[in-house]
Amino acid sequence: MRSPATLPDYERVDGEIPVIHSRGMGDRAAEVRRLLQTGVGALSALLASEPPVLEVMLVSDEDWNEAPRENARVYPSGLPYFTRSVRPPALVLPATLSPAFYPRTEATYPLIVWHELAHAFLLQREVVRTPAWLREFVPQAVSAAVARQASLPLEEHLGEIDREPGFTVRGLRGHVDADEQMAFQNLLLALGAAAVEEFGDGFLKRLVHALWKETDVVNEERAEELLAGALGPGGQAWLLSRPEF
Ligand SMILES: [Zn+2]
């Protein structure tokens, strides 16, 4: 297991979560460091959890194939990911985001960083298998909650989302292309933001801690039960009334 710091000529910015970046990406590294600071503070409080031990790597496009990952096959370029193939685990961020990322607003990059950070928080403990929509709902709802706290123009961002991509978050099945994946994530962001608006952000802690307590594979029925239960009174009826769901 190698350290992320072994990418040649990368610089390291120390902090609660260190940022390792290619030369020439100093400005972006400073921005990421600021977003991490906001994110770690907000997520620790929202989820009542210690922050994960983690490093962030900002990888230039030409070094993408050298970035640490779980297996030998190169990952698609432009897509951020979290990897436990190095110690400490690393959140790998590309210099250039995939064109699949949509919409592009002031909130896009912060939401991506907080989404990945939320995965890292969640994976501090064993998480059983769940339907994809629940696994991705948590980081989407969390990043929406942090964006609200940070007063980012979330409404403007949500206003550019396609609310009727031809499927619901529970209905997407089979092989999914990059655009469908983005539409799926955006529906979850809209649903998460609406849930925070309706129920407040306290349900996030209940949902994450309930997920950590699960010991068996979470099936569709159990997933809905967990989310409705975390939302609280009226949660189930509200969920079923949502077009995204
Ligand atoms: Zn995700």
Image (tube, rainbow, N blue to C red):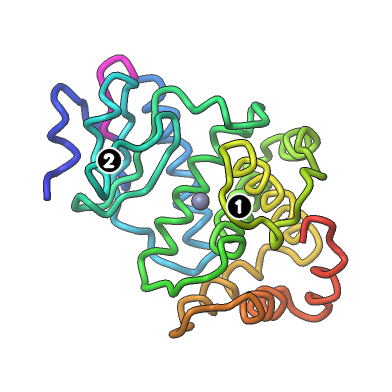
Give the residue at the far top of this rendering: 24
Give the residue at the far front of this rendering: 174
First reached walking from the N terminus: tag 1 or tag 2:
2
The magenta span reads: 20-25
Residue behind mark 1? 140
Label 1 sits on what residue type? Gln
Which of label 1 and label 2 is nearer to you?
2
Instruction: Answer with the quarter of the image where residue 81 lies.
Output: top left
> Residue 240: image x %, image y %?
83, 70
Instruction: Answer with the quarter of the image where residue 63 lies.
Output: top left
> Residue 121: image x %, image y %?
42, 60
- Cα distance between the residues tagged 1 and 2: 27 Å
Q: For residue 18: magenta?
A: no
Dot 1 beta carbon under 8 Å from ligand 1:
yes
| Numbered tag placed on residue 73 in the rendering | 2
Nearest the viewer among 148 and 240 is 240
